[in-house]
Amino acid sequence: MTTCTTEATVAAQPLQFHPPHKSPVAKHAVAQRVWTVAEVQALLELPFSDLIFQAQTVHRAHFDPNQVELATLLSVKTGGCPEDCGYCPQSVHFDTGVEAGKLMGVDQVREAAERAKSAGATRFCMGAAWRAPKDRDVAAVAELVKAVKNTGLEACCTLGMLDEGHAEVLRDAGLDYYNHNLDTAPDFYGEIISTRDFQDRLDTLVRVRNAGISVCCGGIVGMGESRLQRAGLIAELANLAPYPESVPINHLVKVAGTPMADQPDLDPLEFVRTIAVARITMPKARVRLSAGRQSMGDAVQALCFVAGANSIFYGEKLLTTPNPDVDADMALLQRLGLKAARSQV
């Protein structure tokens, strides 16, 4: 694997802010540690063994270290997204061969959820390629949520930005989690996306929290950010009040046709370090080893579990990108002495 220097200075472009709007006010605040970016960076720069030991110690204080949550992700509405996220093959701005489709029907989703449950998953996540769903879209997804809940699985959605009232509709349908990733550090955000602002993401998270839905929120590493900027992402996540119940850490999957297609590979140990620091700074969260596992190899994945990852996306595809197949995952977990676990949040 070719690696690049993660400390390289990245030329930042100014964020492209859009017309001002009134951000929602968080109804609930919690008392928790506030992490500075410098503190998080210091963790990332620890000797590797010291960092892993600290992360494993924190992990064991809050979880069974030999249990891993299995979650399945299904694209219920693929392609045609107006956003220009530089990593995403579903954007209309890039020619990646992904065709826009319509929202899947209730029966299709129910059948997929039942297959996921039979394969051992306990959480079923649905992704739709919208910038921000309309009222009728949210109502339609609410029916999908009900179908998933009827199978006995936890339900999660990622639909883009939510307007006022949308989170409540999803909550009333039984939604357990809403995923909305911060993607990267605030000062690198404008390098990746120009069609929405960092604050837009924070606003949706506040709406989700205010509705009483648990938050799934993480980011992507390997997009050309520096170690300092990875520290900035983790600090933003850890300082959400409260920090997310689920934290997916994605390794960039390079897709032909996107601006990130030729991005140099990240040192895999840098990815493991990011997992470890997420565990230390968000001790009670499910830290999910997410996109990019197929290219990691078993040894790197094993290190991620030692570093505190205790959730994986399970199934042969993540939205439009490949993922290790079920048999390979089960074989790896067995070799490591890990067993499937239900979410404790």
Image: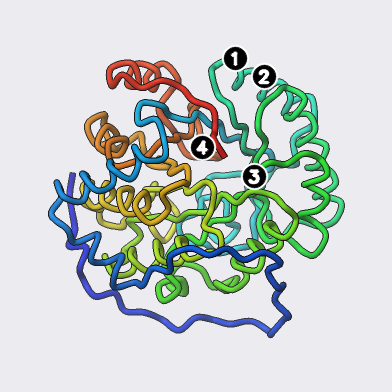
Comparing 279 with 260, the one in front is 279
- The picture quadrant where one finds residue 298 is top left
User: Which residue is at a point 61% across and 20% down the rendered structure image?
Assistant: 117
In front: label 4 or label 2: 2
Q: Nearer the viewer, mark 3 or mark 2?
A: 3
Looking at numbered disc 3 in the image, what kind of residue is underneath it? Tyr
Q: CA distance from mark 4 to mark 1?
A: 18 Å
Residue type highlighted by circle 4: Leu
Which amino acid type is shown beneath numbered disc 1? Ser
Label 4 belongs to which residue?
318
| Of the image marks 3 and 4, the number of the one nearer the N terminus | 3
Q: CA distance from mark 3 to mark 2?
A: 19 Å
Q: Secondary structure at mark 3?
A: strand
Q: CA distance from mark 1 to mark 2?
A: 6 Å
Q: Which residue is mark 2?
A: 114
Looking at the picture, how far across and down is residue 338, in whole percent?
A: 35, 22
- For the point 54% across and 27% down, the residue is 342
Viewed as shown, does residue 166 lie left or right of 152? right
For disc 3, the neighbor class at 10 Å (few under 14, some 14 to 19, many from 20) is many
**Badge 4 density bin: few <14, some 14–19, many ≥20, Cα 10 Å:** many
Check disc 1: other Cα within 10 Å, few if <14, some if 14-19, many if 20+.
Answer: few
Which labelled disc corresponds to residue 118? 1
Closer to the camera, 28 or 87?
28
Secondary structure type for disc 4: strand
User: Nearer the viewer's eye, disc 1 or disc 3?
Assistant: 3
138 with respect to 83 (left or right): right
For mark 1, give the secondary structure. helix
Discs 1, 2 touching: Cβ within 8 Å: yes
Q: Nearer the viewer, residue 27 or 150?
A: 27
Q: Residue 65 appears at what percent x and percent y?
A: 35, 31
Work out how far the residue at label 4 is from the one at label 2, CA to CA, in angstroms: 17 Å
